[in-house]
Amino acid sequence: MSGLEPFRLRLDELDDQIVRLLGQRFATCREIAMYKRANEIPMMQPNRVVEVRERYLSRGSEADVPGDFTAALFDLLIGATCKMEDELIHAPQAAQRAA
């Protein structure tokens, strides 16, 4: 075992946690999409996106994560979840039941 092994094991554990949390976030976004569809709420909520982005950047700063990384990660995450929501909201009913 190299001297790096304990660090690598910790990184593996953290990566597992990150992926699980992302999965939970996407699952919640799927629920939100179904709620928006059922209640005829537009997918895009610009004020909410701004609010979440500001909080995301602030928490990233507090955690000593570089700001450019935090911003890029948020943009990637919000882009992927908005795309998924949009597809679910506009999907035919039969496709929704399968999701």
Image: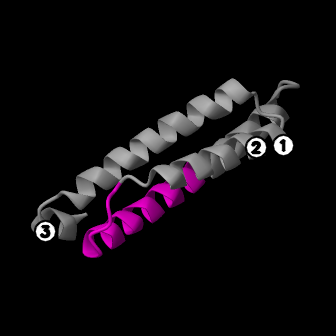
Q: Describe residue 28's horizontal placement relative to residue 72 as left or right.
A: left
Q: Nearer the viewer, mark 3 or mark 2?
A: 2
The disc labelled 3 sits on which kind of residue? Gln
Q: Nearer the viewer, residue 1 or 91?
A: 91
Q: Is residue 49 above or below residue 37?
A: above
Q: Secondary structure at mark 2?
A: helix
The disc labelled 2 sits on which kind of residue? Ser
Q: Describe residue 97's horizontal placement relative to residue 43 as left or right.
A: left
Q: Quadrant of the C terminus?
A: bottom left
Q: Earlier in the sequence, mark 3 or mark 2?
A: 2
Residue 84 visible in the displayed image: yes
Q: Are there few (<14), some (14-19), or many (20+) residues within 10 Å of tag 3? A: few
Residue at 38% x, 52% y is 44
Q: Secondary structure at mark 3?
A: helix
Q: Earlier in the sequence, mark 3 or mark 1?
A: 1
For disc 1, the marked residue is 62
Residue 63 visible in the displayed image: no
Q: Are marks 2 and 1 in contact (CB under 8 Å)?
A: yes
For disc 3, the marked residue is 93
Q: Which residues are magenta?
A: 19-43
Q: Is residue 29 part of the magenta span, yes or no?
A: yes
- Give coordinates of residue 93: x percent, y percent: 13, 68
Which disc is residue 58 wearing? 2
Q: Are there few (<14), some (14-19), or many (20+) residues within 10 Å of tag 1? A: few
- Give coordinates of residue 25: x percent, y percent: 52, 57
Q: Nearer the viewer, residue 13 or 48?
A: 48
* Residue 83 sits in quarter: top left
Q: CA distance from mark 2 to mark 1?
A: 6 Å
Residue at 26% x, 58% y is 88
Q: Nearer the viewer, mark 2 or mark 1?
A: 2
